[in-house]
Image (cartoon, coloured by chain):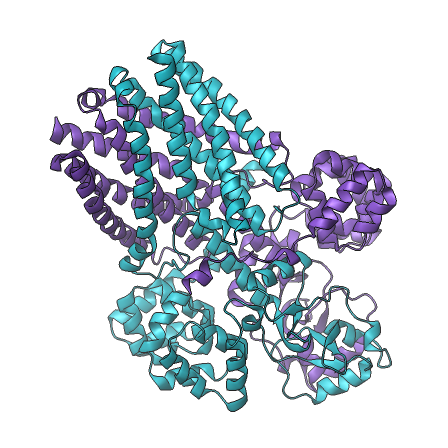
Chain colours: A cyan, B purple
Amino acid sequence: MVENELQSPERDTDEFTLDARIVSGVLEAIGAGDAARVAGLAEDLHPADIADLLEQIGPADRRALIALWPDAIDGDVLSELDEGLREDLIPTLPHSVLREAVRDLESDDVVDLIEDLEEPEQEIILRALGESDRAAVEQSLAYPEHSAGRLMQREVVTAPEHWTVGEATQFLRRGDDLPDQFYHVILVDPRHRPVAYVTLGKILSSRSATRLCDITEDSFRTMSVLDEEADVAYVFNQYHLISAPVVDEDDRLVGVITIDDAMTVLDEEHEEDVLRLAGVSEESSVSDGVFDVVRQRLPWLVVNLFTASLSALVISQFTGTISRIVALAALMPIVASTGGIAGTQALAVAVRALATRNLTSSNARRVVRREVLAGITNGISLAVVLGLGGALVFGSPLIGLVLGMAMIVNQLIACLGGVMVPLILHRIGLDPALASGTFVTTLTDVMGFLAFLGFATWILI
Amino acid sequence: MVENELQSPERDTDEFTLDARIVSGVLEAIGAGDAARVAGLAEDLHPADIADLLEQIGPADRRALIALWPDAIDGDVLSELDEGLREDLIPTLPHSVLREAVRDLESDDVVDLIEDLEEPEQEIILRALGESDRAAVEQSLAYPEHSAGRLMQREVVTAPEHWTVGEATQFLRRGDDLPDQFYHVILVDPRHRPVAYVTLGKILSSRSATRLCDITEDSFRTMSVLDEEADVAYVFNQYHLISAPVVDEDDRLVGVITIDDAMTVLDEEHEEDVLRLAGVSEESSVSDGVFDVVRQRLPWLVVNLFTASLSALVISQFTGTISRIVALAALMPIVASTGGIAGTQALAVAVRALATRNLTSSNARRVVRREVLAGITNGISLAVVLGLGGALVFGSPLIGLVLGMAMIVNQLIACLGGVMVPLILHRIGLDPALASGTFVTTLTDVMGFLAFLGFATWILI
C-alpha cells in the first residue's frame, strides 16, 4: 500500500494530457507556414486543449499560430486560457475576433473574461454584447472582485412554490431561453426570495400532481452576492452542493452558482496556497517568459537576502568562539537546516488546516500545544542521534551535548513558529499562506545559529 | 488590487466555519456529562459539520461525546470523517451502530468507507448490507485502489439510443429505484456500451417526439474502470464535466462518476501536494495526536539530518580558509539560504505545472531553459546587491566579488535543481511532490557552501 501511494498519480497518464505529437505537429506546421495543416491538426481539439496548446508553446510560435489561424481564439478558448496569458493576448487580437468570441458566452464567463482587462478592451467587449447581456455583465462587475456576485450566472430557472410537477414540466417545455446547464428548479416566494429547490431528477420521476414543495432537497443553501468566492468553494466542497442560489441584500434571488465554477475556484485557491507558501507570485505559469519569472520571484529573494543577513549578524557575534573551535562553523548548519524542515512541515499543516477550516478558534490552543509537544519529542529524538554522532566523530561528549541542546531548542521554535505565524496572519486578516518559507526559515536559521553558538560559547569555551 | 489579493480569502468568514459557540457548548455539556444537551446542540448539524466537530475536539472529549451520544455516528458522518480518524474510530464502534450506519449509503460511499479497514471490520459492514448492495461493493473492491472503478457509483440511468423524449420521460416516471443524484440519461447501444448522454434539462425542455440522440451533449466522455482517480479529477476539471460514464474492458457501461466525487479527489490531490512538498505524511490532520505527528514528520527530519551532514562535510574541507578569515563563517549562510528559497520557488512552480498537466514533454526543454535564464538573471541581480553590500561592510571588494560569484552559481543551480528533480521523478513514475524541500535545499546548501568557500579560498587566500 505504501508503494502504491508513492506512485505518481500522473504515471502512465499521457493519454490524458494534450498529445505531444499534436503539439510537435503544430509546431512543424507553424515552422513551414502551413496554415491549413495548423488548423487541421488543432480545430478538433476541445477549447481547453487549444488553450493548453497556446500555453505550452513559446511566445514567438504563439504569435505565428494566431497569425496563421485567426479562428484559433474563440470565446471558449479565451475563457480557458491562463489569466496572465489572456491579458497579454487580448490587446493583440483584432476587434472583430474579440467581438465574435464573446457573443456566445454566458454572462459569468464574460465577466470572468473582462474583469482583469483595461478600460479600452473592456469597452470593446461590452459593445460587442447585446443590450440585455451587457446590462447583466455590467451589474456583475459592480460587485467586488472575488465575490459570489462576480462568480454567479444570472440565468436562473425558477418556479412559484405552490406549483405542481405538471405545471413546472409545462413551463420548462415552453421555455426557450433556458440556461445551457441547470440542475435545479429554484422555488421562490412572491417577493422572489428563494425558499427551496427541486432536482430535475425528482421532477422527471414524480407524478404530475405532486407539489414541488413536497419534493425539495435538504441540501438547499443560499449564498449572498457579497460572499467571497473562497467561501463559496468551501461550502460547495463541505456540503457537496451542485448549485446554490445567490441572493442580494434583500434576500431576493439574483443568480445561481454551479459546482463547475466552485471547482475552478477551489483549484485556483490551491494554486495560490502552493505558490505563496513557496514565495512565488500566484500568477506564475509555464507560459511565462524569463522576465515574468524574474518579476514573480526576485522580490522574495531580495527579502530573503536581508533576513539571511540577520543570520550573518548573529554568527558574527560569535567569531571569537568560531576562531577557537573552527569545527563549529562546519556543524552549525545542521541544527539550522533541520529546524527549517520542521518549520516548513508545521507551516504546511497549519496553512492547509486553516484553508479547510479545520483549524479554528475552537481548537487552536490544542493544536499549538500539540505542535510544542511534537517539537520537543522530535527535538529529543534528533538530539540523541546527532549528539551521539557528534560526540563520536569529534571524540568530545561536550560537542555532542551542545548539538543536542541546540537541536531541541530549535525544533521547539520551528514547530511553534510554523503554527503561530499562519495563525497570527489569519487573525489579522491576511492569507496564512503568505507566511511563505521565508519567515519561518529565517526564524529557524537565526535561532538555530544562536542556540548552537550560544551553547557552544557557554559550554565549550 | 494588490491589497485586495493580499487579503485573506478566510477573512471575516467565521460564518462559514463550524460555530465556535457550538463547539464550546458541546465541550461544556461533555464536561457536565449532559447527554441531552450534547445531542440537542449537535443533532441539527450537517453530517460534514458533525465530522468537523469530532475532528476538532481532543481524543478524550471525542470518546466521551460518542459515549454520551451514540447516534452521533451515522453513515454520512463516517463518510465525512478524515481517513485517519475514521480508521481509529470504526473498531471502537458497537457493531449495531456500524450496521445501521452503512445501510443508507450509496455503493460508492460504502466502498470509500471500508476500503481502508482491516478484514474483520470490513466483514461486519459487508454483512450489514443487503445481498445486491454487498455484491456491488465487493465488485468495486475488486478494482485497484485509487481507480475509477472504486470511485464510481453503480446506480446509473440509461436509455436505448433510439428512444424519444416521451419514452424516456415515461420510463423515469415509472422508475422507483433511481439514484439520489443524477444529471444525465446515458444512451447505450444494444451491447450496453454508452454512446452519448442527454442532460435532464434537455429532456424536460424538449418535445415528446424528439429523439434523444438528437439532443445529446458535446461534453460526453467515458472513463475506464482502471483509470486513476487523479486522471478522473483532471478530466472533470479540464473539460468541466458534471458526470462521466465508466466502462469496463469491453467498453460496457458499469457505473458513473459525478462531479462531487471528482471535486473530493481534486481536493485530496492538492492536500497531498502541499504536504508532500513540505515533507509531511499526507495523512496529517489537526485531529492527530502528538505521536501521530511525530510519526508523520520524524522520518524526513532524520533524512535531513544526514543530508545536512553533507553540508558540514563540505564546510569542514575549508576550515583552513575559515580560520584565516573567520568572517566567512558569518557570510556563508546568506548564499546557501537564498539558494534554498530560489530552489523552493522553482520546485513549487514545476510540481504544480506537472499536476495540472501544463508541463509536458512538449515544453519541458523550454521550461528548463527558462529556469536557467531566470536563475542567472536573479543571480546577477542579487549578486550586485550582496556584492556591493559585502564590499562596503567589509571594506573589501574581493569579499564582495566572492559573494557575488557564489550567488550567481547557486541561483543557477537552485533553479535548475528545482525544475529537474520533479521532472526526473515524474519521468521515472514517482510523484514529483516527493521532491519535498529536503532534496532541493540540500542541493542548494551544499552547492552554496562549496561555491562560496571555494571561491573564497581561490581568490582571498
Q: Is residue A30 visible?
A: yes
Q: Is residue B79 visible?
A: no
The answer to which quarter of the image holds residue A250 is bottom right
Q: Position of residue B345 (x, y in %)?
A: 37, 48
Q: Quick check: A55 left or right of B245?
A: left
The answer to which quarter of the image holds residue A285 is bottom left
Q: Position of residue A389 (x, y in %)?
A: 41, 16
Q: Quick check: B233 left or right of A275?
A: right
Quick check: A272 above or below A33? above
Quick check: B190 above or below A189? above
- Image point 72% across, 46% down: which residue? B23
Q: Position of residue B421 (x, y in %)?
A: 37, 43
Nearer-the-camera pick, B111 or A328:
A328
Quick check: B81 above or below A82? above
- Image point 63% across, 87% down: which residue? A177
Nearer-the-camera pick, B159 or A315:
A315
- Image point 39% across, 72% down: which residue? A42
The C terminus of chain A lies in quadrant: top left
Quick check: B403 above or below B13? above
Q: How many marks?
A: 0
Q: Quick check: A88 left or right of A166?
A: left
The N terminus of chain A lies in quadrant: top right
Nearer-the-camera pick, A110 or A415:
A415
- Image point 26% across, 45% down: which residue? B412
Q: Position of residue B446 (x, y in %)?
A: 30, 32
